[in-house]
Image: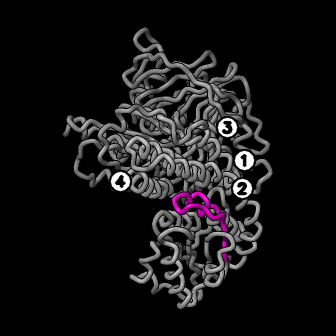
Amino acid sequence: MCGIVGYIGTQAASEILLAGLEKLEYRGYDSAGIATVWEGKIHCVRAKGKLQNLREKLAGDENPAQIGIGHTRWATHGKPEEYNAHPHMDTAMRVAVVQNGIIENYRELREELKSRGHKFRSDTDTEVIPHLIAEFLSLLPSTSPVTPVPFLEAVRQAVSKLKGAFAIAVISADYPDELIVARQQAPLSIGFGSGEFFCASDTPAIVPYTRTVLTLENGEMARLTPLGVEVYNFAGDRLKKTPRTLNWNPILVEKQGFRHFMLKEIYEQPGVVRTCLEAYINSDWNPTDKKTPVNLHLPAEMYADLEQIQIVACGTSWHASLVGKYLLEQLAGIPTIVQYASEFRYAPPPLTPNTLTIGVTQSGETADTLAALTMEKQRRITQAPEFQPRLLGITNRPESSLASLVSYIIDTHAGIEIGVAATKTFVAQLVAFYCLAIDLAYRRQTLSPNSLEQIIQGLRLLPAEIEMILEVQERYIEELAHSFAETKDFIFIGRGINYPIALEGALKLKEISYIHAEGYPAGEMKHGPIALLDAKVPVVAIAMPGGVNYEKVLSNAQEAKARDSRLIGVTAMNDAEASEIFDDILPVPKVDEILSPIVTVIPLQLLAYHIAARRGLDVDQPRNLAKSVTVE
């Protein structure tokens, strides 16, 4: 989950590396460092803590080196101390490496290298890599017809010894015009500039310089020189690859006047919902049409004889998947199970025919989700060939590893999200599930055309309704947040389709405010959690009128009120019954209950944001978390 950048070209590398790391600090921020090659030596500077600490150490350092690598770390092996920060070097300090991922066999490699005289300076798994490369360099001739590119060959031989998931960038004092990169189960992209080349673990780092990008696949490596880029597989075969053009604008990764990226991204949600609906809902559809109202660009065989759907996801994507389960079952009538990807891998359900497996990951790089999908694909091919895999991905990054693993992708069109706590990507995932459920409901004829039209019309109104919440509620929620700056526990409750929103509201608060918060089905409060309640534990209840759950949630809220808890209600505007029960109300437009998650989550995002901001915390980069969880 660390951030990697690399540069080779005609400009001074240090500032480019630092600027790239700033764009990737959401991926890791326990420590940071850069290494450059200048006058036959590697110049390495590292610092514990935030990237600003590294920038301060580099202040006044005039380093004209035109090649270098940089790293922001999220600690896996070894404490977040300067001696564990990347880049790491070999004993002679002639090779420097940055890495994202985990080297699973590093202990054996470390002991083997130590027995041959290599000196280690850190506790990390990464440090074995520069030592391995140096070892192989010492065994190779500096140049020969057999080994025309010894640096590349040494890196290739080194990565062949590594087990696990990794992306690496390597420089050497002895090869000052070469930057070598390699990828295995961890993201890495190469950027093509004018007489200069970049590498990064995520493309925001290089968007300010180029939008021409080549994403390496698993088992691929590349040699970057001032003359160009050469791509190879781990067997050493030269490959032909074609870069693509990103449709991002650098302005998308700026705050644009907002205090934090998270708040900016909350305000982007109306536009995200509009974009996603425009991409998939047929604008001219009406109930008399003989065509589907939704075009997800999925083939008919994906839906043929479908009997079951299973969804694998993690974190916020898991919450979105729970809403998806509700929609797929209630609208399309398809039995659906949702599993944590990390659990699915070790206790998969029995193989069943005509099953669609959906992987949901905003980054398309979530290690557990990719591993779960890979396992499901392999076991269907090898254990039950008659149950051929049907794999679908829902992601915000269609160019990611997920796309190469599954047959088809639903692109959520949310645009880049910088804040670690997902907001607009969550809402975009919900819209994707609405579109999928509507498409299946139409094909399976589980809803009448008029019912479908009513849902679609309601979806089209949602962007304006979100805008109304943001316009009317944010100032009030900011004031309300003052009441909870010292609160230590929160309970969120909801029923039916809004139970996952209670989970998501609790997660948002935990992630960025560090307040303990839990979400429960409202009916389960009396089965244990009610013991936690007193005047110090506020309860947030999601109660949308018009559905079967409304009166039940109000009743459960009354039980909490009887235990002296402060009650906060997310409910429809001007609801007289709710106003008598709740101490504070976060009103949202009255919408059909089936559509309500997209509006009920907005005030919960704002509440979490303003409580965290009021407590003076780093909203965009909460401690111990990273945006893309690319390690298991």
**To which residue does mark 4 refer?**
336
Q: What distance separates the C-alpha of mark 1 from that of mark 2?
A: 39 Å
Q: Which mark is residue 596?
A: none
> As rendered, which of 305 and 130 lies closer to the eye?
305
Residue 135 location, quadrant: top left
Q: Residues within 10 Å of mark 4 (few under 14, many from 20)?
A: many
**To which residue does mark 1 refer?**
55
> As rendered, which of 561 and 463 lies closer to the eye?
463
* Circle 3: element type: helix
**To which residue does mark 2 refer?**
467
Q: Which mark is residue 17?
A: 3
Q: Residues within 10 Å of mark 2 (few under 14, many from 20)?
A: some
Task: Give the residue type at disc 2.
Answer: Glu
Q: Position of residue 218 (x, y in %)?
A: 42, 32
Q: Position of residue 372 (x, y in %)?
A: 35, 46
Task: Give the residue type at disc 4.
Answer: Thr
